[in-house]
Image: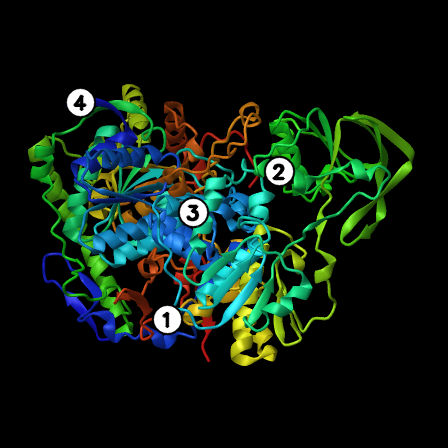
Amino acid sequence: MEQSIKNNSQTVSLLISQSRTNTLGNKTGTWRFVKPLYQNKTAPCSNVCPLGIDIAMVEMHTAKNEFEYALDKLLIENPFPALCGRVCFHPCETACNRQFLDQPVGIHHIERFLGNWGLNHRIKFDRYPSLNGAKIAIIGAGPAGLGAAYFARRLGYTCDVFEKSIAPGGLLRYGIPSYRLPEDILINELQRLSHDGIQFHYEHAFSIDQLDTLKQHYDAIFLCCGDSQAISLNIPGANHVIDGLYLLRQLRNQDAPDIAGTVAIIGGGNTAIDTSRSLLRIGCRPIIIYRRSRNEMPAHIHEINAALGEGVVLKECLAPISIERQSNQLDKLTLQAMKPDTTVHQGRKRYIPDTNLTETMSVNYVVSAIGAEMDMMWHTDQWDLCMSHCRMKNMSGMNLFWCGDLSTSEKTVTHALASGKQAVLALDIFRKHGISAIQDNLQKYQIANGPALSFERYIQGEGLHAKSSELVQFNHINTAYFPTTPTHTPKRLPHEICIQSFDEVVFGYDEFQTVQEASRCFNCGICNDCDTCRIYCPEMAIQWENNNRHILMDYCKGCGICIVECPRDAMTLEVEP
Amino acid sequence: MKHVLEGSHAVSEAVRLARAQVISAYPITPQTHIVEALSEYCADGIMDARFICVESEHSAMAACIGAASAGVRTFTASSSHGLALMHELLHWAAGARLPVVMAEVNRALGPGWNIWMDQSDSLSQRDTGWIQLYCENGQEVLDTTLQAYRLAETVNLPVMVVLDAFFLSHTYEPVDVPDQASVDVFLPPLNPRVELDLNHPNAIGQMAPPAYYMEMRHGIQLAMQSVLDHFIDIEQAFETVFQRTYGPITPYHCNDAEYIFVMAGTSVSTCRHAVKILREEGHQVGVLKLKMFRPFPVQHVRNVLQHAEKVIVLDRNCSFGVGGIFAQEIRAALYACDRRPEIYSYISGLGGRDVTVDHFIEMFERTTKAHKPEKNSVWIGLNLEQGS
């Protein structure tokens, strides 16, 4: 660059170095040996979401008051946000980077608000393409079957859903009490599947032998029948026990069983909690009996806390050994004290009887909630392909997919929906490229290193929504941009009120809280147009043109300030060859 | 109109009246009150100025340099470690010939950690190309700050207005705060000679190779050499509006004095009392107050001191290995005189310790009794005598 000495010949000498022209001639890009890139990365919340929802993007749109875009981002990966916002165990919040600054973002409350907002505003979902001619049969209209129908229809498949009961929903309808999932929300969300190309057939149960009759009509059959067989207590007097899931179904049918007084509920999972909280609401005194300690209960912690807060009694480290019917409505329950053993079984600490310590208690009823298992007719060990959330097998010319509880060990609504998604993608890849291509192809659409899959990328191609599989770590967040603010806690019914009815306990966020809470999101790994990079570039090498930021490589000297300043790790420094 | 103001707020009032447009600072005791008041003026809309909060003094000066390069009137304030952290950019502001004005509250540097009055911080910056003006009281602080803008903008050099920690910054005195109209008469809006222009982008402060650099430095020295004349002109203009004047130096009873004290800052006031007492005892003694330290007013100092027998210099600072800094400057200024008084160098009042009338009388007595000055500066008021 040309230098000049400027001498303003006034009274006081003034010589400074000053260029005659602008600095465009000074191509500082020649100094560079590393270069910045705009590169979206995977947020830890998306990585652990079984459905792989692009949560950072959902929160970004929500924070900008763009609810319709935010809802669309949810619906791309999840058919039922209003429902999942209520019943999902939200591992996203456990992984949320914000927790290391103050508290995680209330992601599930935001999802719930957006889902409700969509229902209230009757936002029409119009991402169903025209039918492609292929047809599938889905056995079971629970979460896995509904998920399969939704994603299959979105690829153009004609779906026939066979449900043995009189209405869709499965566990959503019959297993989850309405104080957690109100019926109108369920019905309204399921409306999303009322579309040309998805046909429900109720009171239509199938046995494995009957599948042959479907063979000639369908290109594939999805087995989504869930764990329908309650596991029974194997103790003397077990014939007096009421099944927890049966009880919940009766309650949901508004067919309250004739049951009162003290009820012992055996088990420590979500069914035990749901059953005991429901019993409390019909006037019983529920006591949960669990063979391990409270910390080892498989039920979600917030559900356990809610149950105990409402007045459910928990007796830990006790296992039933016999039930004696003493009169028509009185059982003598004998319990064995349990203690932890040093050995571990299937990843959990074993509990063994604590010598001869036993106790008895008189209860009016005993309810078993120790889980359910699949009908043995669906059991097989011979698979053509085992995937994380579904299994595939060709049986006498039929392509069968085992979905939901039939194939996953994590038996939650969200995993079941994810299982439907995975099975549909596997089928589509299979039909295009054959069975050997499935695993490799699925990998392309994984969120980070999987197993969750991005339906968005499958449909719209990788380029548009490409994200590096690198996870955004908290230490890559520039926390200078995020003042600490506590999370918003939604109102809930007081314990003494909520046990008087099956009304929904948690109220959820209002619009203001939703936007505020979404604004707490770091938007890990995605560019939200904050423009910090452009403002801080010392060479003004970042330009905003045609609705896009681009870096003028003639001037970018590779200083990395943009990368350091980026609040959310949406840029990467790359060594140049 | 007279207000009872602390010295810090006398600065704030002057900056408000000077219509500074960009203020950037980082808080540090004992300077904080100055920018605290200014930040409120900015927030309340009393001043039409941008207050830029920064994470360090280095950045505060950088912000002032950027704003001054864009041709606006700027202000910052600092002290002690904060000023030390600015050091690199003090050179830049002067080298870029930007008329930045700063209030510098004299405070000691640690360790030991000390927030009290000491001249080491500003004197450590004497070679950065900044004009340094030391003040004695609240009124002088206000007036000097107004003069500083006009001076800086005339010679295109930055000005440091220096005031003693606590003795001045936190002491309330009656101060005449002039009205805006009078100040506007004295201080017209900045007409920058250096100014970035968005319509004609160019770069300033770039590489100056050996063929150019020296002339730029010579330019700074020439500008410094012109400061004294400009300052006297500016003071005359100031006097016509405000009827007050100070001068680069202020002699007190020096005309017939055999012994003359020399110092800067608030201790001048104490020393005047000592001079009165000594005069009553029949001693021919005076005190010379130094206001301007950079550029050093050599001829003015010579004119006052060359006829004295002995000159007693009080330094509230120490250049370790040499001694009092003012004493050295005085020695250098008088060296070329035909007749030179002896220079007695005393160090006292470091880190906020009081320099009392008794201390001045002790200095006077030691000086009058001595046949010639000690080899090293003599420390007065020590609590602990240590071996050589």
The three-letter amino acid code for the residue at tag 4 is Lys
Labels 1 and 2: the sequence-earlier one: 2
> Which chain is indicated by disc 1?
A
Q: Which residue is mark 3?
A: A115
The three-letter amino acid code for the residue at tag 1 is Lys
Do the residues at discs 1 and 2 belong to one chain? Answer: yes
Q: Is residue A527 left or right of residue A21?
A: right
* Within-10-Å neighbours for mark 2: few <14, some 14–19, many 20+: some
Q: Compare residues B276 and A174 and report the one nearer the observer.
A: A174
Tag nearer the camera, 1 or 2: 2
Q: CA distance from mark 3 to mark 4?
A: 67 Å
Tag nearer the camera, 3 or 4: 3
Residue at image location 24% in from the left, 50% down from the top:
B158
Q: Which residue is mark 4?
A: B2
* Within-10-Å neighbours for mark 4: few <14, some 14–19, many 20+: few
Q: CA distance from mark 1 to mark 2?
A: 70 Å
Q: Which residue is mark 1?
A: A557
Element carrying mark 3: helix
Which residue sits furthest right? Answer: A356
